[in-house]
């Protein structure tokens, strides 16, 4: 079993990480503001540089129209120039601190863990049979804090689980992506039930038409990736 990185593994704690991320957020906002100013200044300099030529050769109309290319070049070239200037002349003590080095190591380890965990758990979910898939989903929902119960009484029942008293859960373990007809079938049964919300969990995912159909309806579509996200949250 791969180990989930913890703050303590890198001499960090919640307070230190929060302070670092707050400083990073402020630095990012400051950099964004500096880039915008650089773009406008460069656009103005380009326009001023070509203005004598325009006055000599062209009419007032062309002089006004020339603002457009000045803005385009100013904003295109101003962004990389602004980034270079900002990182060249505006340095923060944060980036040389030991805690920031530990923070970067932690985030790198966290990303590596996440990628490995996703690959591992995707194979786990895909290889489960019908009953195993449903059973593991029920267990995961309970670990995630949901009040879940199995209400399937026969193989013909479309509703497998319920969350609380108002949410029906349809569990589909077949590999192919579910099509629009399947979702419409579930939705029709759901509307005729006493439930107010529904979740459809499909091992094979869904087609694009399914997501369009479910939009703005009281039905959510979960695939294996959503289940893995729940697993990662449950590890915290």
Image (cartoon, rainbow, N blue to C red):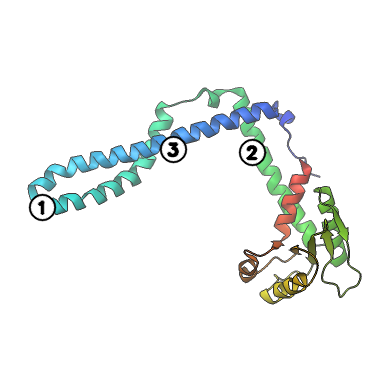
Disc 1 from disc 2: Cα separation: 58 Å
Give 219 or 95, whichever is nearer the viewer: 219
Q: Earlier in the sequence, mark 1 or mark 2?
A: 1
Q: Nearer the viewer, residue 124 or 197?
A: 197
Q: Earlier in the sequence, mark 1 or mark 3?
A: 3
Q: Secondary structure at mark 3?
A: helix
Of callouts 2 and 3, the N-terminal one: 3
Measured in 3D between alpha carbons, the distance from the residue under mark 2 to the one under mark 3, in whole angstroms, is 25 Å
Residue 107 x/y as whole percent: 64, 37
Q: Nearer the viewer, residue 20 or 154?
A: 154
Look at the numbered discs 2 and 3 and tell me whether their residues touch, using CB distance below 8 Å: no
175 vs 28, left or right, is right
Which residue is at the far left? 56
Q: Nearer the viewer, mark 2 or mark 3?
A: 3
Q: Position of residue 211 (x, y in %)?
A: 63, 66
Q: Which residue is mark 2?
A: 108
The label shown at residue 59 is 1
Q: Look at the numbered disc 1 and give the secondary structure of its residue.
A: loop
If the image is split into quadrants, where does the N terminus sit?
top right
* Occupied quadrant, residue 190: bottom right
Q: Residues within 10 Å of mark 1 (few under 14, many from 20)?
A: few
Q: Which mark is residue 32?
A: 3
- Tags 1 and 2 in contact by the CB under 8 Å rule? no
Query: What kind of element bears circle 2?
Result: helix
Question: Residue 97: x percent and y percent?
Answer: 58, 23
Residue positioned 25% across, 40% down in the render: 44
Q: In the orientation shown, which residue stands out farthest toward the right?
A: 153
- Say the numbered circle drawn on residue 75: none
Residue at 88% from the left image edge and 73% from the top image edge: 155
x then y, percent, for residue 10: 70, 29
């Amino acid at each position: 079993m791969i180990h989930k990185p913890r703050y303590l593994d890198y001499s960090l704690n919640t307070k230190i990480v929060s302070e670092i991320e707050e400083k990073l957020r402020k630095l990012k906002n400051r950099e964004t503001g500096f880039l915008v100013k650089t773009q406008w200044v460069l656009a103005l300099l380009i326009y001023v540089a070509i203005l004598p030529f325009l006055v000599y050769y062209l009419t007032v109309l062309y002089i006004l129209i020339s603002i457009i290319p000045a803005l385009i070049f100013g904003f295109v070239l101003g962004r990389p120039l602004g980034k270079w200037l900002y990182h060249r002349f505006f340095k923060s003590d944060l980036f040389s601190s030991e805690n920031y080095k530990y923070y970067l190591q932690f985030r790198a380890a966290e990303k590596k863990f996440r990628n490995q965990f996703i690959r591992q758990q995707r194979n786990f979910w895909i290889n489960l049979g019908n009953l195993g898939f449903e059973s593991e989903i029920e267990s995961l929902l309970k670990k995630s804090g949901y009040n879940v119960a199995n209400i399937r009484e026969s193989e013909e029942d479309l509703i497998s689980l319920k969350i609380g008293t108002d949410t029906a859960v349809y569990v589909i373990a077949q590999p192919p992506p579910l099509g629009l007809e399947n979702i419409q079938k579930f939705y029709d049964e759901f509307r005729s039930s006493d439930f107010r919300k529904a979740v459809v969990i499909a091992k094979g995912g869904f087609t694009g038409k399914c997501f369009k159909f479910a939009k703005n309806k009281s039905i959510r579509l979960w695939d294996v990736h959503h289940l893995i996200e729940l697993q990662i949250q449950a590890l915290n």
